[in-house]
Each structure stands twice: as C-alpha cells, then as structure tokens.
Amino acid sequence: MQICAFKLTTRMRLLINFSRGYFKSMLAISQKIKFYRKRIPSFECIPGCHDCCGPVTTSSFEMSFLPVKTDEEHDAALNNLSCPHLASEGCSVYEDRPLICRMFGTTPKLLCPHGKRPEEMIDPLIEAEIHEFFLSTRQVLV
C-alpha cells in the first residue's frame, strides 16, 4: 500500500482558513435570517395585489436561494419599477422572499397602501436589528 502525502503550501492553508471563515459567516447569516423571519408578523394581503412589490435589495445569501433571472428580465422589471420575481399570479418566490419583502406592511416605515397590517406590528427592536443586518451585509438588487 502506497500512501500519498503532500505538503500544504501557504496558499493552500490560506484558502482552507478562508473557506472555514466564509462557511462560519454564511452559517451565522443563515441563522440570523431564520431568527428574523420568525419575528416578522404575517398578515392577510389583498389577493392579487402587488403594490408593495418593486425593485428591492437583499443580502447575497438570500439572493442565492432565488431563481436566477436574465439581464433582460431584470431590465424589464426595473423599467416597470417592479420585481423580476413578480408573476401574473403574484410573487413567484413567496416562500423564499427576502426579509425586506416580508417587512412590508408590518412597520410604520413600510405601510401597506391599502391599510392591511398584522394585529401587532413588528417589534421596534427587531425592526432596528433587521435594519442593522441590512447595513452589515452586502446588499444586491433582486
């Protein structure tokens, strides 16, 4: 039996350490998103309404769960001041929609134009934490 051994180069060690750090960072972001999603109250929207859907930004992590859209789809959505994931029947990524989309109608800063809202609005401390999260993560246009 022959054993294959190799020496780790400095570059390999740096890459391994970077990968570990990146994985830990992504895990922490995932846990924060799950935590915040559980604390954003839900409410009944008007069926077929999409007045709150427009161009938004989201974390790279959340974006990684959304279907990839073409440049043409993005351009068409931006020209209509819409979201590329808005379909004729509503949000095509509703279950995976970003935090910012989930916040619409749950805070005085993002009111529903039709007056719909949860029984209890989002806790102001959680809202502030979510805004800090937005500032601390790289945001990309959906």
Image: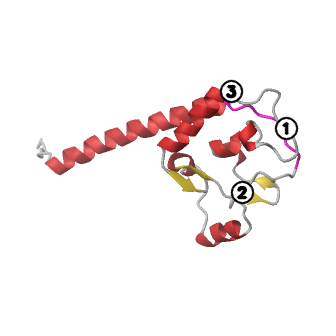
Q: Is residue 50 left or right of residue 64?
A: right
Badge 2 local density, few (<14 within 10 Å), some, or many (20+)?
A: some
- Range drawn in magenta: 39-47
Q: Quadrant of residue 121?
A: top right
Badge 1 local density, few (<14 within 10 Å), some, or many (20+)?
A: few
Residue 108 image point, x, y percent = 75, 37
Residue flagged by tag 3: what amino acid is it? Asp
Determine the main secondary structure of the stretch shown in magenta.
loop
Mark on residue 54?
2
Q: Nearer the viewer, mark 1 or mark 3?
A: 3
Q: Nearer the viewer, residue 134 or 21?
A: 134
What residue did someone put label 1 on? 44
Give the structural element (helix, strand or loop) at label 2.
loop
The quadrant of the picture occupied by the N terminus is top left
Q: Of the two numbered discs 1 and 2 on the same chain, state the one appearing first in sequence.
A: 1
Vertical placement of 24 versus 77: above or below?
above
